[in-house]
Image (tube, rainbow, N blue to C red):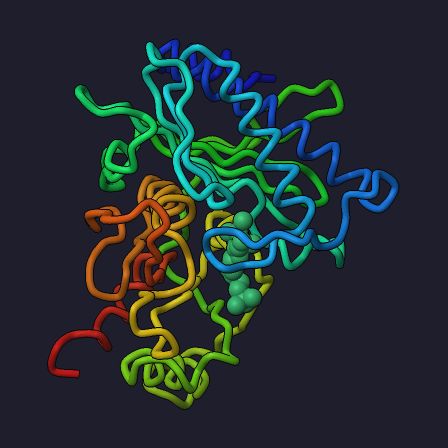
Amino acid sequence: MQLLSSFLKHRKTDEQLVELIDTLMVACKEIALQLREGALAGVLGTSENTNVQGETQKKLDIIANDVLKKVLLDNRLVAGLASEEEDDPVAGNPEGRFLVTFDPLDGSSNIDINVSVGTIFSILELPAGEHPAHHSAYLQNGRRQLASGYVLYGPSAVLALTTGQGVNFFTLAHTGDFILTQENVQVPVETKEFAINMSNQRFWEPAMRSYIGDLLQGSDGPRGKNYNMRWIASMVAEVHRVLTRGGIFSYPWDGREPQKPGKLRLMYEGNPMSLLIEQAGGLASTCYQPILDVEPTEIHQRVSVALGSRNEVDAMLQYHTPEN
Ligand code: AHG
Ligand code: MN
Ligand code: MN
Ligand code: MN
């Protein structure tokens, strides 16, 4: 039985990084407890606030954000943080070394119906000469992440983590420890499963419409396979499925709001999930370039996402070449 911190130390992970990941898990355990109590703790339902993304916040979006903020700002290693639920970055210890960006509660439309949600995080280093209260400190491309991961609050709570040496799963035990349950996770190269919100089809680019159209034709169509479809509406749960049994997950750019390239956020969803997927042998693309190569210009910026099994994402990319 291997505990999270001993597993990381054994792999010679930077000790301060291990400490920070342990701290993050203190917060995630607290969030898991609040979620478990649900209606008993009066935490379900909607607040009266709107976040910087223009979304109405659920009570649990705010609770999870507050828990993460408090726990992280108590850690001397944390120079600052940026969150989906905060307008601006929050500075921590001026001597701190790390920046943490996070989606405190992903899939929050699922809270009130008792369906899986998650927390997504990304760890960056504070660049020399940058101030952790300034947006510019966080505008680093995804390849500069020191670590990323999520905790899926499902039937069990599972941490998927990468520190740049592959992906591993840890399950939260009743003792409060995260215990290694799957080592060196690999996304299967082939798949017959896709996940996309089909109700947005009329807004997609022609390339995406034609790719999904071909999947829907099944074994009679050009792809020659019968595909299955899933849509949980929690990115954490979708990515967990993709890491576990393969698949392609996409929330692509669509034409509704041309100034917004997709719904998902680069710093809190796109980058951390793309590092996990690449580290597990899969691909993560905007449909035109690897997500990890996108140079961020705003901390809350959106990004088009298509990620998962290597051969399926490759096939999807063929539809997006200039001649199509
Ligand atoms: P969040 O709850 O953090 O705002 O993110 C929700 C995201 C993502 O988890 C999911 O894939 C997608 O929104 C679902 O969107 P639709 O409701 O449009 O299907
Ligand atoms: Mn949200
Ligand atoms: Mn989210
Ligand atoms: Mn969220």
Q: Nearer the viewer, residue 192 or 303?
A: 303
**Which quadrant of the figure contains the N terminus?**
top right
Q: Is residue 82 above or below residue 1?
A: below
Indicate the position of residue 273 as horizontal and vertical percent values: 40, 46
Q: Is residue 177 above or below residue 282?
A: above
Residue sitting at x 34%, y 13%: 94
Indicate the position of residue 298 as horizontal and vertical percent values: 28, 48
Count of residue discs: 0
Q: Quadrant of residue 38?
A: top right
Indicate the position of residue 165 as horizontal and vertical percent values: 33, 28
Q: Can residue 164 be spotted in the picture?
A: no
Residue 77 relative to residue 127: left or right: right
Residue 259 relative to residue 195: left or right: left
Q: Nearer the viewer, residue 172 or 92?
A: 92
Residue 233 relative to residue 304: left or right: right
Indicate the position of residue 180 as horizontal and vertical percent values: 55, 25
Residue sitting at x 37%, y 65%: 262
Q: Nearer the viewer, residue 312 or 175?
A: 175
Q: Is residue 260 above or below residue 35?
A: below
Residue sitting at x 16%, y 74%: 321
Residue sitting at x 29%, y 85%: 206
Seen as rendered, the residue at the extreme left is 323
**Which quadrant of the figure contains the C terminus?**
bottom left
Q: Can residue 311 be spotted in the picture?
A: yes
Seen as rendered, the residue at the extreme right is 40
